[in-house]
Amino acid sequence: MLIQFSFGLIFWMTVSFLAVLFILRKFAWKPILETLNERERGIEDALSEAKKAREEMAALQARNEDLNRAAREEREVLLKEARDIRDKEIAEAKEKAKAEAAAMIERARAEIRNEKNAAVADIKMLVGELSVEIAEKLLREKLADDAAQRALVDRMLKEAEARLS
Amino acid sequence: MKALIRATFLLFSVLFAGVSVAQHEGHDHAAGDTAHHHEMVATGAEAHAEHTEAHDEHATEKFNPGEMIMGHVTDEHGWHLWGHTSLPLPIIVYNTERGLSVFFSARFDHGHKTYGGYYLHEGKLLATDAPDGTDVHSATQNEALTAATWDVSITKNVLGMLVSIALMLIIFLSVAGGYRKRGVGAPKGLQSFIEPIILFVRDDVAKANIGPKYERFMPFLLTVFFFILINNLMGLIPIFPFGANVSGSISVTFALAAITFVLTLIHGNRHYWGHIIAMPGVPKPVLLILTPVEILGVFLRPAILMIRLFANITAGHIIVLSFFALIFIFGEINAGLGWGVSVFSLAFTIFMSMLELLVAFIQAFVFTFLSAMYLGAAIEEPHHH
């Protein structure tokens, strides 16, 4: 009774189950499963795209930072170079000015020396001439009187002194 | 282990139920025989009177719980609604000698009369040479003709199954329509109720057991799952056109298990058959024992599928009906006692129905899960160690 295999029921069951299987496979399971797969693919794509965008963003940021750092470094280098050049130029200018000043001083000294030498020469010449004149006059006085000659030399000397001062 | 104990218990309960029915039928025969003697001396008109009297007698007959329960869980030609009212269903018989006969089950007069050379006995359609309208107790079976008879009637279970199928088609075609309309957008309504179940079958049943080639079995697994689930649920609704014990009918579970079996046979690969016929790495003498066991296993797996679903669903129905039967058994002793018991019976019935609701899902899942496992074993590729 309870465990009774009935041909009719097995027959209808098999026929109708297979019919349902084919109908649902074509008109229900296929579109449903396809849509579900599509949706999952869509979600996966969206997630991977978001990840990619995030990675790109990070890469871009890293590149920007690199660029910034490079620019900063370059600026440092340029500034350093400029500072070096300026320091060098200042040093050179100082050097040059010192050298020129030294040369000018040297020239001035030489001139002073020359002038002094000329003056000394002049004085020597004048002293010579005066000596000759004194000697000339001395000689003449000597010829007259001893006392007179002596007086003459004194006077002559006084005159020379006055002229020299 | 738990499942084994449960199956044993169920089998025993089924067997006991069978015994009680057999006893009941023995009584019936005895009663029928006396009626038959009466009819022998009665004229036609009197026979009719006798018959209605017999009916009345039947109505005041003591309540028989075994008959009530069996009537509800087994298949029948015609759908018993209440009292003596049955919905007539088409009887379709093909006999290799007589050809095709199609008529309504009402012609059998609740199984009391012969018609078109056939009569019903214990739910089976038998061929006879007796003329139309003969009482079944005086009709004798023509065994040669019965053997040539193919009964493909639309029985209670067939109709119940067709109702479930219609429901399935309505539900899933409309859900599929939802997917067509909304595309990959968020599911709505029925769609959002069905979608998690479909995903569950796909991810936890098909993918988990079959592996990467799961896709070609998805239509089968989904159809089996929802077919069993909907039939289980419909079987819990006691109002026509539901309430037929479709998934608790062994013919139905046999056909379902047979389809799984055929699919494993078709898709079984060399690796699968190789392991059955000669398990690699096993010594030859052991193979003498192992190979028959493995071959037996091939048939046992679908047999277990068949018995598990049948026994679980039928046992649930029997238990629920038994609680109801208690009311009437006590009611016969004393009306007040019947009312008193009804409170407890109702509480237990509600509890059991809740349990059955759970079982409906579990059994649909288990059948699908095991089918997927067997299919997965059949198409498994050899592992390269």
Image (cartoon, coloured by chain):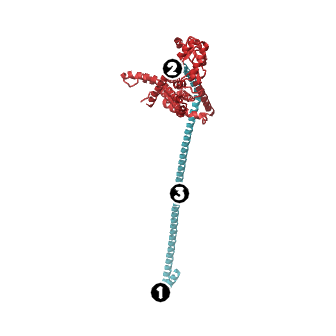
Chain colours: A cyan, B red
Rendered location of residue A128, percent (x, y): 49, 77
Query: Which residue: 50% across, 74% down?
Result: A120
Mark on residue B27?
2
Say whether residue A76 is visible.
yes
Q: Residues under labels 3 and 1: Cα distance? A: 83 Å
| Mark 1 secondary-structure assignment | helix
Q: Chain of mark 1?
A: A
Asked if both marks, 3 and 2, belong to the same chain, the answer given is no
User: In this orientation, does residue B95 appear?
Assistant: no
Label 2: element kind: helix
- Report the residue marked by disc 3: A83
Q: Do the residues under discs 3 and 2 have CB atoms within 8 angstroms? A: no
Circle 2 marks a residue in which chain?
B
What is the number of the mark on residue A150? Answer: 1
Q: Residues within 10 Å of mark 3 (few under 14, many from 20)?
A: few
Count numbered badges in the picture: 3
In the rendered image, which quarter is residue B57 located in?
top right
Quadrant (top left, top right, bottom left, bottom right) of the N terminus of chain B: top left
Name the mark nearer the viewer: 2 or 1.
Answer: 2
